[in-house]
Image: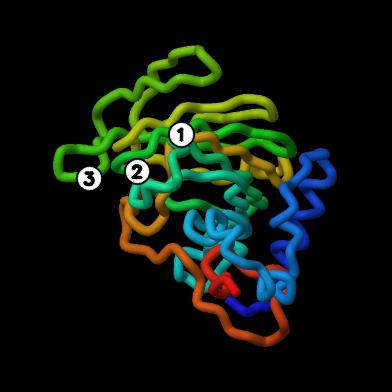
């Protein structure tokens, strides 16, 4: 992705967050120059990859495959000094964008429609060899209501609704056409995007960046070492 595309995506998500009056923690507003001056007191942010994130899944077509997100809090199963067992994210996805089919080996999560349009989340069980189980019905939990749906069903979440995604449950998501962009929340167990994403098709996770203008914000994978 070009840095200019990333900058535009970050500003667009910031505008959506302001529209829905969600107050972000201070570190989400740090400039690259401010990050260059931060000491070890901010190591939790660096070590646990808190902050801004953009993914195009390595495909180079962000408007069709990808979305913007912020990790607000997270623990770390590999570092004993971080004892949180939970994580929280905000996600922003526009009409036409797509998050491809995947599951998590370890993480359970709730995906919450915080506002905007409607999100469609397709669900499949995984087979023992991690293929899509196209036959078995799926028990899904939407805000405390259990539903049984055929494999491959797109569960529709309107603003305020949420769905629980268990480990090994394949899911993808996109925006219902005509409903507008969506601000999503994610509340989960500890998140590790480096080791806990099983994509049905082989994909990347973090973008390759072409520097065509200075960064507006640093992504969570770009923080400089502590001073």
User: Label 1: which residue?
Assistant: 109
Question: Picture coordinates of residue 209 (x, y %)?
Answer: 56, 79
Gap between marks 1 and 3 measured at Cα: 21 Å
Which residue does the image show at 73% across and 35% down from the upper left?
115
User: Label 3: which residue?
Assistant: 131
Question: Picture coordinates of residue 18 (x, y %)?
Answer: 83, 46
Q: Residues within 10 Å of mark 2 (few under 14, many from 20)?
A: many
Q: Which numbered disc, 3 or 2, marks the residue that appears first in the sequence?
A: 2
Gap between marks 3 and 2 measured at Cα: 13 Å
In this orientation, which residue lies closer to the viewer: 179 or 99? 99
**Quadrant of residue 97 within the rendered picture:** bottom right
Q: Which numbered disc, 1 or 3, marks the residue that appears first in the sequence?
A: 1
Question: Picture coordinates of residue 149 (x, y %)?
Answer: 39, 22
The residue at the far top in this view is 145
Q: Is residue 48 above or below residue 132?
A: below
Q: Is residue 131 above or below residue 153?
A: below
The residue at the far bottom in this view is 212
Q: Is residue 47 left or right of residue 104?
A: right
Which residue does the image show at 70% across and 56% down from the upper left?
27
Element on which disc 2 rests:
loop
User: Residue 5, can we see it?
Assistant: no
In this orientation, which residue lies closer to the viewer: 153 or 227? 227
Which residue does the image show at 45% across and 45% down from the upper left?
82
């Amino acid at each position: 992705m070009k840095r200019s595309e990333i900058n535009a995506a970050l500003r667009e998500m910031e505008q959506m967050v302001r529209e829905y009056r969600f107050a972000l923690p201070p570190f989400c507003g740090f400039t690259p120059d401010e990050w260059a001056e931060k000491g070890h007191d901010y190591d939790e942010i660096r070590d646990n990859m808190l902050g801004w994130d953009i993914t195009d899944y390595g495909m180079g077509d962000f408007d069709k495959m990808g979305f913007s997100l912020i990790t607000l809090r997270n623990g770390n199963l590999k570092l004993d000094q971080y004892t949180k067992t939970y994580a929280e994210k905000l996600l922003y996805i526009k009409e036409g964008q797509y998050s491809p089919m995947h599951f998590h080996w370890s993480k359970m999560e709730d995906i919450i429609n915080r506002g905007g349009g409607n999100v469609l989340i397709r669900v499949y069980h995984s087979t023992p060899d991690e293929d899509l189980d196209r036959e078995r019905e799926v028990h899904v939990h939407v805000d405390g209501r259990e539903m049984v749906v055929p494999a491959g069903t797109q569960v529709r979440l309107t603003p305020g609704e949420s769905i629980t995604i268990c480990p090994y449950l394949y899911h993808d998501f996109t925006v219902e056409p005509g409903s507008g962009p969506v601000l999503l929340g994610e509340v989960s167990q500890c998140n590790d995007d480096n080791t806990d994403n099983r994509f049905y098709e082989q994909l990347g996770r973090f973008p390759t960046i072409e520097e065509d203008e200075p960064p507006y914000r640093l992504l969570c994978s770009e923080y400089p070492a502590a001073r």
